[in-house]
Structure formats: structure tokens, C-alpha cells
Amino acid sequence: MCEKYRTLSRELNKKVYKHIEDWRNRPIEGEHPYVYLDGIVLKRSWAGEVRNVSVLVMMLKN
């Protein structure tokens, strides 16, 4: 019984991944604006106390 479910699961995964790969490899048409966000946490000292400070970077491509 267990092998039957493994086989069924394997076959369903193949079907799903085929659709995912088709979607990922489709041609992109038209303009698509996007926002790129990134960040880093730095340790900084203020008044003798070390604290974590977040630095965020945002770029917009229009």
C-alpha cells in the first residue's frame, strides 16, 4: 500500500513541476516595474552602549 502512495505522489509531483517549469520559462512581455529590498544589521556604539542598527536599501526600477 505504501509503494502505491509513493508512486502516486511521484506522478503528481511530475505533473505539478511541469506546470511550474512552463510558468518559470515563459517569455516576459511588456514592462514590469519592481522593487528590490535588502538590509543588513550592524552593531554600533552610542553613548558607550552597543546596539544593533538596521540599514535598509530600496531600489525601484520603473
Image (spheres, rainbow, N blue to C red):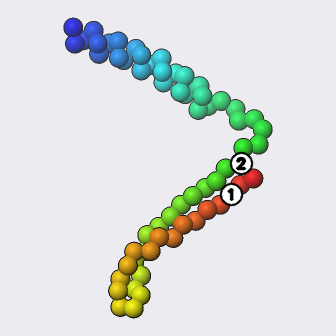
Q: Residues within 10 Å of mark 1 (few under 14, many from 20)?
A: few
x 36%, y 17%: residue: 10
User: Which quadrant: the N terminus?
Assistant: top left
Q: Is residue 28 left or right of residue 10?
A: right
- Secondary element under disc 2, as helix, strand or loop, is loop
Query: Which of the two labelled residues, at mark 2 and mark 1, occupies the earlier sequence position?
Result: 2
Residue 8 rendering spot, x and y as whole percentages: 35, 12
Residue 29 figure quarter: top right
Which amino acid type is marked by label 1?
A: Leu
- Secondary element under disc 1, as helix, strand or loop, is strand
Residue 12 figure quarter: top left
Res. 60 mark: 1
Q: Residues within 10 Å of mark 2 (few under 14, many from 20)?
A: few
Farthest residue in the right direction? 30
Task: Decide: is 28 above or below 22.
Answer: below
Q: Is residue 18 left or right of residue 59?
A: left
Task: Decide: is 10 above or below 62.
Answer: above
Residue 19 rendering spot, x and y as whole percentages: 54, 22
Q: Is residue 36 left or right of residue 51?
A: right
Task: Decide: is 22 above or below 6.
Answer: below
- Residues under labels 2 and 1: Cα distance? 8 Å
Farthest residue in the bottom direction? 47
Q: Nearer the viewer, residue 30 or 27?
A: 30
x 65%, y 60%: residue: 59
Farthest residue in the left direction? 1
Which residue is tagged 2? Answer: 33
x 58%, y 65%: residue: 57
Are discs 2 and 1 less than 8 Å apart at CB?
Answer: yes
x 40%, y 86%: residue: 45
